[in-house]
Image (cartoon, rainbow, N blue to C red):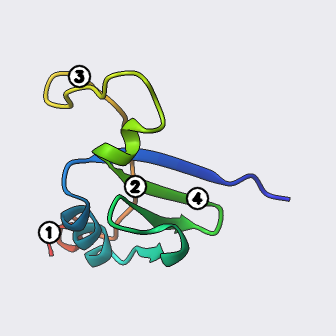
Amino acid sequence: MAQKVSANLPVRDLKKSMDFFGKLGFTFNAQFTDETAACMTISEDTGSCSSRSKFQTFTPKQICDATKSTEVLVCLSSASREEVKK
C-alpha cells in the first residue's frame, strides 16, 4: 500500500488559498474539507492545507511568522508563470 502524505500549511485565509490553488487546477477532497481546513489533492496519495487555527491544534509550538522565518518550502510545477498569475 502506498504511504499517504499530508503537508499541513497554516494559511491565513483559507478561502483565498483555496481560490488561488483552484485556479491552478488543484481540487479539494470534500471529505476532509470544512471551514477550518481544506484537503487539496496534490496527487492520489498527497494532500495539503490548513487554516492557522486548525494547524495550531496539531502542535503545541508557536506558528512562526513567515515574514521573518521560513516555515516550509513548497514547490509545485506549472506550465508557465502566466498560468500562476491567472
Residue type highlighted by circle 4: Thr
Mark 2 neighbour density, 10 Å: few (under 14) some (14–19) many (20 or more):
many
Question: Which residue is under mark 1?
Answer: 85
Comes first in the chain, label 4 or label 1: 4
Q: Position of residue 67 (x, y in %)?
A: 13, 30
**Distance between mark 2 and mark 4 Cα atoms:** 11 Å
Q: Position of residue 75 (x, y in %)?
A: 39, 49
**Distance between mark 4 and mark 1 Cα atoms:** 24 Å
Which is in the foreground here, disc 2 or disc 4? Answer: 2
Q: How many numbered marks are there?
A: 4
Question: Which residue is under mark 4?
Answer: 46
Which is in the foreground here, disc 3 or disc 2? Answer: 2
Comes first in the chain, label 3 or label 4: 4
Q: Which structural element holds mark 3? A: loop
Nearest the eye: 59 or 41: 59
Residue type highlighted by circle 1: Lys
The mark found on residue 49 in the picture is: 2
Question: Which residue is under mark 3?
Answer: 69
**Distance between mark 3 and mark 2 Cα atoms:** 19 Å
Which is in the foreground here, disc 4 or disc 1? Answer: 4
Image quadrant of residue 23? bottom left
The residue depicted at 32 percent of the width and 23 percent of the height is: 62
The residue depicted at 31 percent of the width and 44 percent of the height is: 53
The residue depicted at 40 percent of the width and 55 percent of the height is: 49
